[in-house]
Amino acid sequence: MMEIMLQKIKKGYFLHIYIWISLRCCCLASESLAKMDLYI
């Protein structure tokens, strides 16, 4: 029972990190695009 809970927590934890990194990359990409628009 405890192992199943730990596996779920691990999966949720990795998913959280994955989503956070994805959002971070999207933010950085949109920021760089905004800067590109300023230069053009």
Image (cartoon, helix red, strand yellow):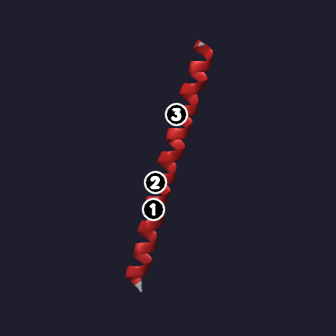
**SS of the residue at dot 3?**
helix
Q: Which mark is residue 28?
A: 3
2 and 1 marks in contact (CB < 8 Å): yes
Q: Which mark is residue 22?
A: none
Where's residue 25, x and y in %? 50, 39
- Report the residue marked by disc 1: 13
* Vertical position of residue 21 compared to residue 8: above or below: above
Q: CA distance from mark 1 to mark 3?
A: 23 Å
* Vertical position of residue 35 compared to residue 15: above or below: above
Where's residue 38, x and y in %? 62, 15
Of callouts 3 and 2, the N-terminal one: 2
| Residue type (three-letter) at the residue carrying disc 3 | Leu
| Residue type (three-letter) at the residue carrying disc 2 | Ile
| Mark 1 burial class by Cα count in 10 Å: few <14, some 14-19, many 20+ | few
- Report the residue marked by disc 2: 17
| Mark 3 burial class by Cα count in 10 Å: few <14, some 14-19, many 20+ | few
Where's residue 28, x and y in %? 52, 33
On-image quarter of the N terminus: bottom left
Q: CA distance from mark 2 to mark 1?
A: 6 Å
